[in-house]
Image (tube, rainbow, N blue to C red):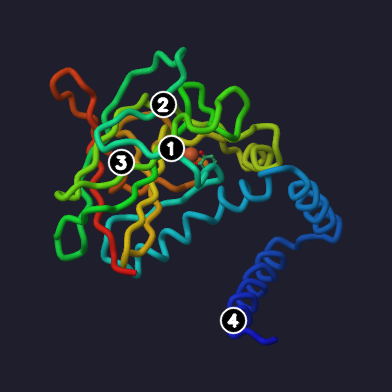
């Protein structure tokens, strides 16, 4: 069954790729190598997903940001899990007992595009451990840690305590990491926190926060850092506080 959007997008994609192949006189041997590389990539868990996310997911966020008024969307990455524990607003995300990394407070207001606070937004927050792994995905970190769901109050406010994430290294020996290395690039993402905000009548909003001045903010292997999402850490009453506000578009 013909689908017009598939037709126009795939036609454009094929045109662009054929143009690149011609420009660089890609040989049949190289073409064969690419097929084998992609086949091998797809046979490894996460690896094809990781490769596509690494090079292309930011473009979906850019496209969304160009169309919408709200705060900047960003990539989701491979490690979102639906079943994060619900915690009270102001509560703590569960971290491992041996995680001695700095504790931080993440807080902010969620408003609509008219500036009205939105109560009852479900906010998912997830980030890596102090060792750069994700719970429920990598060994040694049970599901339910380093992830939480909370709900904004009547002022559209949310607040949560957690440990500060560290830069995340995508597997260097996987096909994505090897491709980056062949391009002369490293395979690090700057430390980041993931968010997914959902509420009735609202466009689902996926984004991240980065820390100003930290490693790899200027050289993310995923090219996903957007200036608006690079946040200052403030010292307030002896706590490190990051304020991430949201403006959500209507669905
Ligand atoms: C991550 O943690 C991530 O956020 C992305 C986009 C890719 C790989 C790992
Ligand atoms: Fe991540």
* C-beta proximity under 8 Å, tags 3 and 1: no
Of tags 2 and 4, the one toward the viewer is 2
- Image quadrant in which you'd find residue 187: top right
Instruction: Judge the density around disc 2: few (<14), some (14-19), many (≥20) Cα neighbours within 10 Å.
Output: some
Residue ID for mark 2: 94
**What is the spatial separation of the Cα atoms under label 3 and label 2, in whole angstroms?**
24 Å
Q: Earlier in the sequence, mark 2 or mark 4?
A: 4
Query: Which of the pair 90/237 is nearer the observer?
Result: 90
Residue ID for mark 4: 8
Queried on whether the Cβ of the residue with tag 1 lies below 8 angstroms from ligand 2, the answer reads: no
Q: Residue at x 55, y 25 (%)?
A: 141
Q: Earlier in the sequence, mark 4 or mark 1?
A: 4
* C-beta proximity under 8 Å, tags 2 and 4: no
Q: Position of residue 194 (x, y in %)?
A: 41, 42
The vertical placement of 211 against 240, above or below, is below
* C-beta proximity under 8 Å, tags 2 and 1: yes
Of tags 3 and 1, the one toward the viewer is 1
54 sits left or right of 250 in the view = right
> What's the mark number on residue 230?
3
Instruction: Judge the density around disc 4: few (<14), some (14-19), many (≥20) Cα neighbours within 10 Å.
Output: few
The vertical placement of 241 against 110, above or below, is above
**What is the spatial separation of the Cα atoms under label 3 and label 1, in whole angstroms?**
27 Å
Say which element carries label 2. loop
């Amino acid at each position: 069954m013909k689908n017009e959007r598939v037709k126009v997008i795939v036609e454009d994609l094929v045109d662009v790729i054929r143009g690149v192949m011609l420009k660089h006189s890609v040989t049949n041997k190289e073409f064969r190598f690419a097929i084998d590389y992609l086949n091998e990539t797809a046979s490894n868990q996460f690896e094809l997903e990781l490769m596509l996310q690494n090079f292309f997911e930011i473009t979906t966020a850019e496209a969304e940001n160009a169309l919408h008024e709200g705060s900047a969307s960003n990539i989701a990455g491979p490690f979102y899990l639906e079943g994060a524990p619900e915690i009270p607003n102001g509560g703590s995300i569960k971290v491992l007992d041996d995680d001695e990394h700095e504790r931080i407070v993440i807080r902010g207001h969620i408003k609509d595009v008219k500036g009205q606070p939105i109560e009852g937004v479900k906010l998912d927050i997830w980030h890596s451990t102090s060792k750069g792994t994700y719970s429920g995905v990598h060994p040694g970190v049970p599901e339910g840690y380093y992830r939480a769901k909370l709900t904004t109050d009547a002022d559209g406010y949310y607040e949560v305590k957690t440990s500060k994430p560290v830069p995340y290294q995508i597997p260097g020996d996987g096909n994505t990491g090897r491709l980056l290395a062949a391009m002369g690039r490293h395979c690090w993402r700057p430390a980041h926190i993931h968010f997914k905000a959902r509420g009735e009548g609202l466009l689902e909003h996926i984004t991240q926060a980065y820390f100003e001045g930290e490693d790899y903010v200027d050289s993310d292997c995923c090219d996903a850092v957007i200036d608006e999402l690079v946040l200052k850490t403030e010292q307030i009453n002896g706590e490190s506080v990051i304020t991430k506000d949201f403006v959500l578009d209507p669905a």
